[in-house]
Amino acid sequence: ECTLKSSGNCTDITLMKSASQQLSLPVLKYFVTDVMSKTADNVSSMLQDVRSERVTEVRLLNGYVVDSGFNKYNVECPWNKHLCEAVEALHPLSEM
């Protein structure tokens, strides 16, 4: 049975563990595979924004994870921080 919900705000595994959510490799694999199969033909709004040279929501989404991880749980989320920096480096207007 899958106990991981896709509607949550936590996208960093370290943050989810700190928030006392139970994660196992089979649950995570099921969740990721399910989402991938359901969204295989989608073009993400963030990719559409980058291609159109518009400001992205990367700082709002992943910045929230970085800030919450550190401020609420005393956990660093380096991959989420790196994702913010990498997407923002694609386009100078992405920096807010």
Image (cartoon, rainbow, N blue to C red):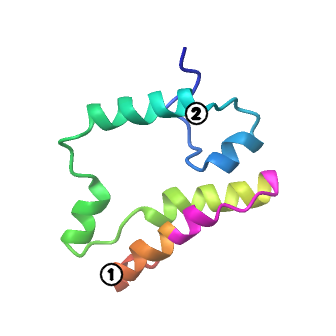
Outermost residue to the right: 74
Q: Quadrant of the N terminus?
A: top right
**Distance from the alpha carbon under mark 2 to that under mark 1:** 35 Å
For the point 59% across and 22% down, which residue is it? 3
Instruction: Answer above or below: position of 45 versus 59.
Output: above
Q: Position of residue 43 (x, y in %)?
A: 21, 51
Q: Is residue 91 magenta?
A: no
- Specify few, some or many for label 2: CA neighbours under 10 Å numbering under 14, 14-19, or 20 or more: few
The mark found on residue 91 in the picture is: 1
Q: Position of residue 50 (x, y in %)?
A: 26, 70
- Residue at label 2? 25
* Residue 32 in which image quadrant: top left
Write the start and end of the magenta stretch as one range. Answer: 73-82
Q: Amino acid at mark 2?
A: Leu
For the point 28% across and 55% down, which residue is it? 45
For the point 78% across and 52% down, which residue is it? 72
Q: Amino acid at mark 1?
A: His
- Specify few, some or many for label 1: CA neighbours under 10 Å numbering under 14, 14-19, or 20 or more: some
Q: Position of residue 62 (x, y in %)?
A: 53, 59
Relative depth, front residue between 29 and 53 = 29
Q: Secondary structure at mark 1?
A: loop
Q: Secondary structure at mark 2?
A: helix
